[in-house]
Every structure is written in C-alpha cells, then in structure tokens.
Image (tube, rainbow, N blue to C red):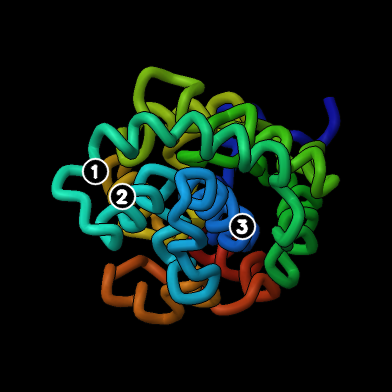
Amino acid sequence: MGDKLPNETKKCVVFDLDGTLADTSADLIAAANYCFSALGYGKILDPVEDSLTAFHGGRAMLKLGFERLKLDDPTDAVNAQYPILLEAYGRKIDTHTVLYDGAMDAVEALRKDNIAVSICTNKPEQLAETLLQRLGVRGAFDALIGADTLPTRKPDVAPYHASVERAGGTVGRSMLIGDTVTDRDTARAAGVPIVLVGFGPSGESVNSLAPDAMLNHYRDLPSLVERMLR
C-alpha cells in the first residue's frame, strides 16, 4: 500500500505564482510597455516602481499607464490592448523572471513529507504552464489552476478548492501561500490558513492584511507548514 495518505486526509499547500513563487514583475511590465510603445507613447511603466501593480495583472498595468496618459475613461483602451499584452508577454515570458530564493527547495521538502503541492494563480492557465515549463519546475507541482481554468478566479473559492482536490489533497487540511489581499480573501473564503510572503514587492507591509503567518524566507516554510497543518 505504500506510505501515501488517503486523499481525504492528505495535506496540501497551495501557492500563488506571481510575487509568491517567482518574481515575474519585470517581464510583465515589459509586456505592458510594449503596448504603450506600439501606440507611440514610449515606456510608461517603471519595472521597479510599478512592480506591485504588475502582480495585480495585465489590466491593472494597462489601466495605470493610460491613467498617467490622462485618458478620462481608459476602459476601451485597456480592453483593446489586453490581448496584445498577453501575446507580447507570452513571447518573452521568462526573460527576467526568477524563482524566489529557496522556493523549490521548500517545495521539494514538502513533497518528501508526502504533502501535496499545487498552484492557484490569476495568470491565464496556458501562460502559467508555459512559464513553469520554461523555469523547469512544472513537474514539481501536482496541479495548476489558472485564471481561466474555471469560470471564476480568486478570490472566488472554487479555483482554490480545485487546486487542492486535483492535487489529491483535502481542503480541510490545506493552506495558501500568497502575497496580496486577493490571496488573503481567497483563504478566508475557503476557511484555511493564509501565509503571506514578506519578500515580494509589498515587503512586510502585507502584514497589515492580518495573515495567519508571515514568511520571510522559504527556508522557514516546511516548519511553518508542520505547525499550521498539525
């Protein structure tokens, strides 16, 4: 029978992707700036100063840029440029992106402890698949749920449930690792612990979101999981 726990009792740790497992901000900003440059505006967003906006998605970046250009209602411009941004991002999805220090060591440690690991992200599923493949880590995760995998996305609870169940775990013995209020709200809706990372663009200011715990380096994750899912 082996040492695997049955699904109804198996623990699962769910990770957000952008800003949690990997710093994708520079490539996201570059894709948005591609849109602005093609329209003749040049590079409107800064890869450092606007990195936090990058983790709120393509539409948020476009909205910020068009607001800086003094468009009264940028909705139509955002909708028109969004598919162009996604195409540009897909072409150069891993030019600057890096995994956070110790992230995959922590994932492997969880797997050795027979804990399921999955990803629940608001990045479109195919882009998330492509990025993880390019980074060489897709095989380390038991499941991946993207923004368009289901009819709803985070903070709706359905994607979180699916990410746990498709990984072979159970929601009642799971927890979420994230970096934004969206992740916090998702975990609260699911009734599971939320851990927010302190090394993303928001830094330790995410502590104001009242997570169940903060994670300042991935080396601390295995012991944190053990304590929170005991």
Q: Which residue is mark 2?
A: 63
In primary-sequence order, the first of circles 2 and 1 is 2
In primary-sequence order, the first of circles 1 and 3 is 3
Classify mark 1: residues with Cα within 10 Å, few (<14), some (14-19) or many (20+): some
Q: Quadrant of the N terminus?
A: top right
Give the label, 2 or 1, closer to the camera. Answer: 1
The residue lying at 43 percent from left, 35 percent from top is 81
Give the label, 3 or 2, closer to the camera. Answer: 2
Q: Which residue is mark 1?
A: 74
Residue 9 is left or right of residue 156, and the answer is right
The residue lying at 66 percent from left, 70 percent from top is 218
Classify mark 2: residues with Cα within 10 Å, few (<14), some (14-19) or many (20+): some
Name the kind of residue labelled 2 in the image.
Lys
Q: Which residue is mark 3?
A: 24
Instruction: Please tell me whether residue 28 is drawn above or below residue 106 in the rendered image.
Output: above
In primary-sequence order, the first of circles 3 and 2 is 3
Residue 88 is left or right of residue 82, and the answer is right
The residue lying at 61 percent from left, 57 percent from top is 24
Residue 61, position as x, y percentages in the image: 40, 53
Question: Mark 3: which secondary structure?
Answer: loop
Name the kind of residue labelled 1 in the image.
Pro
Closer-to-camera residue (110/49): 49
Answer whether labels 2 and 1 touch (C-beta < 8 Å): yes
Question: Mark 1: which secondary structure?
Answer: loop
Classify mark 3: residues with Cα within 10 Å, few (<14), some (14-19) or many (20+): many
Residue 121, position as x, y percentages in the image: 51, 41
